[in-house]
Image (spheres, rainbow, N blue to C red):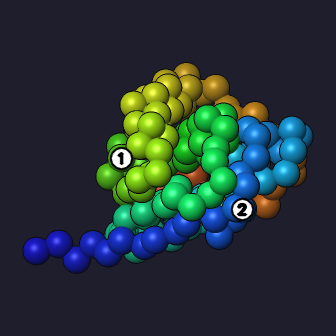
Amino acid sequence: MENTKTIDFSVIEFSQSPGPRYCSQGDDSGEMFYHQELNQKFAEAYQSGNKLRVILDGADGYASSFLDEAFGNLVYDFGENVVRNSLIVVSDDEEVWKTMIFNETIPEWEKRRKNNLSPKLTATHDKWFRIVNGELKKEVWK
């Protein structure tokens, strides 16, 4: 019997109206969502052996670039296997977003990670988590 719990997090806790890909492009960006919310919440779930369920429903809508940036950074910092094993995405309103994240974003960003193609940063961010050589570390990554 598994003791894994699921921790729920709704994107609308970050913004009712998620914005563009990068901080430099406007408010409530995918980059900002990742650095202010998703990275920390995912790391907490991962450290405790739980799964993070991210609920996309209820927001005004998403640019595909917002989702790609947020969930792509997650893959870059934690790796495809960890993300697939520890992330649940709920998108009953628009099933296409969940499909895009798992079928396009995750594999594409895993290739970037393996090729050391770092994500673009358009703002200064506080320390964030990343798995390095099997160890979870928190720092400002370049």
Q: Which residue is painted at 37% across and 65% down in the image?
A: 51
Q: What x and y, as percent, mark residue 48?
A: 40, 74
Q: Which residue is painted at 89% across and 40% down in the image?
A: 24
Distance from Cα at disc 2 to Cα at disc 1:
24 Å
Q: Please determine whether, in this image, residue 6 is positioned above or below residue 118.
A: below
* Circle 1 residues within 10 Å: few <14, some 14–19, many ≥20: some
Count the numbered circles shown: 2
141 or 103: which is nearer to us? Answer: 103
- On the question of residue 87 being in view, the answer is no
* Circle 2 residues within 10 Å: few <14, some 14–19, many ≥20: some
Residue pointed to by mark 1: 84
- On the question of residue 86 being in view, the answer is yes
Q: Which mark is residue 15?
A: 2
- State left or right for residue 103 relative to residue 120: left
Q: Which mark is residue 140?
A: none
Q: Quadrant of the N terminus?
A: bottom left
Q: Which residue is painted at 63% across and 48% down in the image?
A: 61
Please tell me in which quadrant of the rendered image residue 15 appears.
Answer: bottom right
Residue type at numbered disc 1: Arg
Q: Of label 2 and label 1, which has the lower sequence position? A: 2
